[in-house]
């Protein structure tokens, strides 16, 4: 019954926004590093939590460990888009979905065909030299050993992602706020809504069709107009 209600809302709207988190990518085989397995693996290998390794200060002080973790645990180039990614791209093609706002850094939405993707935390598929600004793709990083260096100036090439202790891109956040504040249907999926400031974006929604799709409960469930505690891929398989 709940999925039927969501279907009707989607059928009757051409102003939908999707806001997604790690749960969208876990169904493509990309683990959530905040999950128990990710945390325990990191602690056993490096003696610290993943949030520490992926912080700006750790990157500055411990570049060898940062790049080892980055290359061994964050890169999943063989991961494929799943049903949710493809369904969202199809809704965009039909003129219903205005934007995908994602906390993920894996490029799967783009590979599924989505065009208007706002990457709150950046992407691993863009890398740049912190010295001269030269840009590099993922393949360059994969083929490098140890700390990735720029072939032009020998500066350090880092992923274009927002590390802990760094601020989100103001332009991307501004666009996300604009889309969410003006949308008719806001679908939030695959996120526990515990990571701020990204999770705070939901507060800008002014409509009455807030949909939360997540396997576990969230602190925003009571505010939602529709809650589906299911795998997000299963939901979108039924919708499209």
Image (spheres, grey):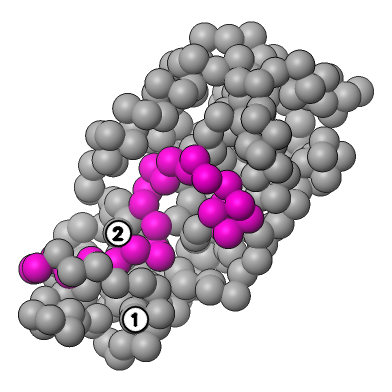
Q: Which of the two discs, 1 and 2, sits closer to the camera?
A: 1
Compared to residue 117, the image places residue 94 above or below, namely above
Measuring from the top left, give residue 114's x and y in whole percent: 57, 47
Can you identify the residue that label 1 sits on? Answer: 140
Residue 113 percent coordinates (x, y): 61, 52
Residue 188: quarter of image: top right
Q: Residues within 10 Å of mark 2 (few under 14, many from 20)?
A: some
Cα distance, mark 1 to mark 2?
14 Å
Do the residues under discs 1 and 2 have CB atoms within 8 angstroms? no
Of helix, strand and loop, which one carries label 1? helix
Q: Is residue 63 above or below residue 223?
A: below
Q: Which is more toward the observer, 14 or 64?
A: 14
Residue segment shown in magenta: 108-132
Q: Is residue 87 left or right of residue 44?
A: right
* Residue located at (12% from left, 81% from top): 152
- Give me the residue at 66% from left, 50% from top: 85
* Residue 51 in picture, x, y percent from top left: 36, 57
Verify whether residue 36 appears in magenta. Answer: no
233, 63: nearer the viewer: 233
* Residue 224 in view of the camera: no
Q: Secondary structure at mark 2?
A: strand
Splitting the image into 4 quarters, where does residue 224 fall? top right
Is residue 112 depicted above or below 19 in this figure? below
Quadrant where the C terminus lies?
top right
Residue 161 visible within the image:
yes
Q: Which residue is mark 2?
A: 160
**Residue drawn at (24%, 81%) of the image:** 148
Is 18 on the left or on the right of 27, as rendered? Answer: left
């Amino acid at each position: 019954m709940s999925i039927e209600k969501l279907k009707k809302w989607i059928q009757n709207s051409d102003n939908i926004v999707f806001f997604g988190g790690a749960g969208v990518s876990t169904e493509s085989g990309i683990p959530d590093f905040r999950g128990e397995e990710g945390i325990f693996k990191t602690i056993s290998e490096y003696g610290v939590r993943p949030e520490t390794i992926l912080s700006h200060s750790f990157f500055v002080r411990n570049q060898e460990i940062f790049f080892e973790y980055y290359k061994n645990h964050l890169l999943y180039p063989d991961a494929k888009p799943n049903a949710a990614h493809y369904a969202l791209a199809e809704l965009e093609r039909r003129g219903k979905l205005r934007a995908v706002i994602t906390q993920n850094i894996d490029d799967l939405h783009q590979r599924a065909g989505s065009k208007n993707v706002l990457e709150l935390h950046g992407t691993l598929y863009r890398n740049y030299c912190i010295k001269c600004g030269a840009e590099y793709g993922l393949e360059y990083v994969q083929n490098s050993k140890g700390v990735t260096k720029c072939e032009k100036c020998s500066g350090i090439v880092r992923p274009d992602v927002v590390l802990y202790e760094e601020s989100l891109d103001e332009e991307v956040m501004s666009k996300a706020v604009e889309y969410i504040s003006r949308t008719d249907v806001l679908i939030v999926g695959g996120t526990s809504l515990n990571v701020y400031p990204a999770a705070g974006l939901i507060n800008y929604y002014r409509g009455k069709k807030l949909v939360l799709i997540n396997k576990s409960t969230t602190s925003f469930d009571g505010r939602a107009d529709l809650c589906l505690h299911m795998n997000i891929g299963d939901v979108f398989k039924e919708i499209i």
